[in-house]
Amino acid sequence: MDFDALFTTQLDALKAEGNYRYFAELERKCGKFPKAANHGEDGVRDVTVWCSNDYLGMGQHPKVIAAMTEAVQRCGTGAGGTRNISGTNHDHLLLEAELADLHGKEAALLFTSGYVSNWAALSTLGSRLPDCVILSDAGNHASMIEGIRHSRAQKVIWKHNDVADLEAKLAALPANAPKIVAFESVYSMDGDVAPIREIVEVAERYGAMTYLDEVHAVGLYGPRGGGISEREGIADRITLIEGTLGKAFGVVGGYITGSAALCDFIRSFASGFIFTTALPPAVAAAARASIRHLKESGDERRRHQAQVARLRAELDRAGIPHMRNESHIVPVMIKDPVKTRMLADYLMEEWGIYVQPINYPTVPKGTERLRFTPSPLHTDAEIDRLVVALSHLWKQCALAHAVA
Ligand SMILES: *Cc1c(COP(=O)(O)O)cnc(C)c1O
């Protein structure tokens, strides 16, 4: 059997659709955020990264680097095993206490990534709670969808951010079945924010537990970086808050927080927690330093919001249409995979501006876009230069301008 021919046929189809994924080979430069070296076909050169999920540049913060370096010197590189078999390090427990405190919960549990935390927690809850029904927002991340699928629990999809639809679907279910309402706070592609309070109130009325993914909000919102649920003062009413250490906290890893019984339950039954080597202690130490810094300092958050507002204002001035939302994510809709790729290539080649085209299956077909994530470290000059570059492109490619 010619397996490579089978692979190539499908890859060719992907290329014909414009949905084949090309990765930019970058070398991040510590202390130069958002600059990175791009290793391209014609050599190496500096580019400005405009699509990083290291939203605040914390991956290069001196305190975070110092914490990681210190822990490597103290503990070495790896954790040495799964959490069960010699892998539970002191730094993991310190980090879990920090995370429980961040969200005002009794306990927290670490995973190797945010993806794994969603997958493991939802699949364990859905499969272990008898007759469980999971009500999942239609816009949920792949990691939640896969976790729910793997649980084999009954799944009900409610319309994105639509509380009335959620309520109708809750009302139609048997009163005594355990129910989980799973949703996100900031949706990463449209940058829209869930009506958390309304969702929690409806869930409470029907005795459902709430499962909230705050991956794109932790570190960024709330007085201590506890996310939208902290900002809205509703974290204490959410059963489980999930987050990542890999985005605004600038390191890697994922976690859940909730009651001591809930975390112990996932710890004890989740295959994706039990059977994998724990995060390196140095990663845990670095993440803890990042979280501690952002609990105390609001400077990064304020400057972040200021630069986001600046980019939006400059785009408006140039008549470049972008999606309105109340978050830090600035999507510029192109609505065609081939054009989106072309624009991104041009920005990279002509301007040294790196933004990854976002295409299917990350977003639905026909909603392809460039997704910009300004950071506190993008200067005013870099923002202006991006908008000048986009304006050139808009003229050259006869793309539609926003109607003023
Ligand atoms: C990125 C992402 C995750 C996964 O987090 P990682 O730490 O990157 O694995 C989970 N949920 C959402 C909404 C995400 O965008």
Image: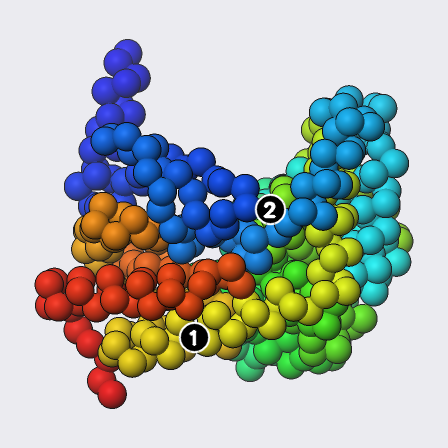
Looking at the image, the residue that sits furthest to the bottom is 404
- What is the CA distance from the residue labelled 1 to the residue labelled 2? 23 Å
User: In this rendering, would 217 be left or right of 175?
Assistant: left
Mark 1 neighbour density, 10 Å: few (under 14) some (14–19) many (20 or more): some
Res. 72 visible in picture: yes
Q: Amino acid at mark 1?
A: Arg
On the image, the x and y values in percent for residue 241 come to 72, 60
256 vs 70: above or below: below
Q: Secondary structure at mark 2?
A: helix
Quadrant of res 267? top right
Residue 235 is marked as none
On the image, the x and y values in percent for residue 91 come to 83, 38
Q: Nearer the viewer, residue 176 or 319?
A: 319
Q: Secondary structure at mark 1?
A: helix
On the image, the x and y values in percent for residue 337 come to 23, 53
Residue beneath label 2, please?
60
Residue 310 is marked as 1
Mark 1 / mark 2, whichever is N-terminal = 2
User: In this rendering, would 99 be left or right of 153?
Assistant: right
Q: Amino acid at mark 2?
A: Gln
24 vs 189: above or below: above
User: In this rendering, would 186 be left or right of 2?
Assistant: right
In the rendered image, the quadrant that contains the C terminus is bottom left
**Which residue is painted at 17% across and 41% down in the image?**
16
**Which residue is painted at 77% across and 56% down in the image?**
292
Quadrant of res 88? top right
Res. 226 visible in picture: no
Identify the colour scheme used: rainbow
Q: Nearer the viewer, residue 138 or 372?
A: 372
**Which residue is painted at 35% across and 46% down in the image?**
47
In the rendered image, the quadrant that contains the N terminus is top left
